[in-house]
Image: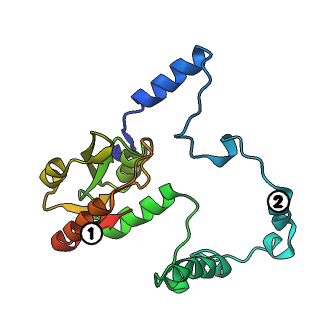
Amino acid sequence: MFSTRFRWDLKPNRITLALVEKRRGGVPVLDLTESNPTRAGLVYPSEILQFFAEERILRYDPAPAGMTEAREAVARYYAKRGIRAEAERILLTASTSEAYGYLFKLLTDPGDEVLVPRPSYPLFEFLAGMESVVVRSYPLIYYDGWSIDWERLLGEITPRTRAIVVVNPNNPTGSFLRVEERERLARLSSERQIALIS
């Protein structure tokens, strides 16, 4: 009766299990994988909250791509850094998960593949499954810092590969791509005509 794309493995991963064990043992934990700002112990300055009392915020005025003013601010941010990004071509989303869903819809057909790093953001399988996309992984290896295992990455590319995903900084490792890795990924993406999602 229901689609098979929702049959995913719900078992907790090793990081989640270790976190639960530490907390049960009463060990104080600073969880650097926490990406929900409402659970990260942040204190919100009152001047930020005053924004929500403005008249224009209380008026419903749908903008499917995001508020024009917000998209213009994003364009200005990039312009100050020498990057041309037109506000009309910027799409704001409510979350990275929503953005990944849009990108998977845009770039793939059912059965196509995206390559994602391991370890990485734990929702890729779920998000790709919602779009009937196959997830293939390439390992990040640790030797004096995290880096891409290029041999394995290249070995995972098939004729159905439509995108290579990188998470920078990586969640949960906190590692960043090195300049040479970014440049090599850009060349690979261009040569193979595979989208690079970062």
Position in image of residue 165 (x %, y %): 33, 57
At 57% from the left and 41% from the top, the residue drawn is: 34
At 27% from the left and 59% from the top, the residue drawn is: 181
Position in image of residue 110 (x %, y %): 27, 59
Q: Quadrant of residue 15?
A: top left
Check the image and name the residue furthest to the front: 144
Q: How is the image coloured?
A: rainbow
**In-front residue for pair 42/63:** 42
At 30% from the left and 55% from the top, the residue drawn is: 133
Q: Classify residue 52 as left or right of residue 32.
A: right
Say if mark 1 contacts mark 2, CB within 8 Å: no
At 38% from the left and 48% from the top, the residue drawn is: 124
Q: Residues within 10 Å of mark 1 (few under 14, many from 20)?
A: some
The disc at residue 49 is 2
Position in image of residue 173 (x %, y %): 42, 41
Q: Say if residue 97 shows up in the picture.
A: yes
In this view, the mark in front (1 or 2): 1
Please state which amino acid type lies under the numbered disc 1. Answer: Ala
The quarter in which the N terminus is drawn is: top left
Please state which amino acid type lies under the numbered disc 2. Answer: Leu
Position in image of residue 100 (x %, y %): 43, 59
Q: Classify residue 2 as left or right of residue 143.
A: right
Check the image and name the residue furthest to the top: 25
Report how far apart the C-alphas of labels 1 and 2 lie in the structure.
40 Å
Q: Classify residue 87 as left or right of residue 156.
A: right
Q: Say if residue 12 shows up in the picture.
A: no
N-terminal label among 1 and 2 = 2
**In-front residue for pair 12/28:** 28
The disc at residue 186 is 1
The quarter in which the C terminus is drawn is: bottom left
The kind of secondary structure element at disc 2 is helix
The kind of secondary structure element at disc 1 is helix
